[in-house]
Amino acid sequence: ESCVHLLKICVPLVKVLRLVDSEDRPSIGYLYESMDKAKEAIRDNMKGKKKLYMPIWKIIDERWSGQLHCPLHVAAYYLNPAIRYLPTFKKDREVEYGMLDCIDVLVSDSKEQDAIHMSINKYDTASGTMARDTAVRCRTTMRPGIGKRDFILFFLLFSFYSTFSHIYSDNIFTFHLLLDLWWERFGPDCPELRKLAIRILSQTCSATGCKRNWSVFQHIHSKKRNRLEHKRLNDLVYVHYNMKLRQ
């Protein structure tokens, strides 16, 4: 019974980690919503009993807010067309503030900032080229940003271009990367916002930090030391991991 209870908590979170490590599509545009869905799944698995799921939510919120969450996640959630135009999209204060913070930090030119703010309304209302039937159909089929595999392709093409630069044009590798991006295809009416969106949605995510912790857990919680109390085990992992960081 205890194992089933743990699985009901862990499985939704493991799905988020699998999404983060995905190479098929850029995951940053889906991470913010995935965390909300994971919490809702845990609540549903606990049959809506607050005394069961609220302590878990508290732990998730402390780790998410204290270590993991940043305005980029919110801005990527907002700029992902596969999510922005869904009825379930939530444009609350956190989302709006995160978008404003990213514009202030990532765009230094004041005129470009103003142009982005003017273009956001076009994106919200899906006007111009974004209102085309093709654009609507491709919201979920075309990638919003550049994924991990694309970065590998970038370096391969860059190396190839460096060798044969006398034959190919300067933009050949960039063209291949942007070929099937939704923003590149349907965002010509708001070029400044398009540039920012591709930049944010192409940021890579990784579960490497969690993997490092798991390897430390495995090292400490061995067959000979499998009766350690949970708090003591966490303390040992914390000390060991931070000692590695200092080195």
Image (cartoon, rainbow, N blue to C red):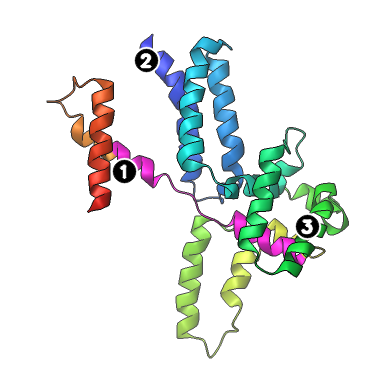
Task: State the residue in front, 189 or 232.
Answer: 232
Q: Mark 1 points at which residue?
A: 212
Q: In this view, does 99 lie to the left or right of 235?
A: right
Instruction: Tell me residue 80's x, y (percent).
Output: 68, 48
In this rendering, is residue 200 above or below 206? below
- Over which residues does the magenta segment extend? 191-214
Rounded to the nearest angstrom, the CA distance separating label 1 from label 2 is: 24 Å
Tell us which disc is closer to us: 2 or 3: 3
Question: The C terminus is located in which quarter?
Answer: bottom left
Q: Mark 2 points at which residue?
A: 3
Q: Is residue 219 left or right of residue 20?
A: left
Mark 3 or 1, nearer chain start: 3
Task: State the residue in front, 187 or 199.
Answer: 199
| Residue 217 visible | no
In this rendering, is residue 57 above or below 180? above
Hey, which residue is sitting farthest bottom in the picture? 166
Mark 1 or 2, nearer chain start: 2
Question: The N terminus is located in which quarter?
Answer: top left
Is residue 209 one of those drawn in magenta? Answer: yes
Is residue 223 one of those drawn in magenta? Answer: no
Quarter assignment of residue 92? top right
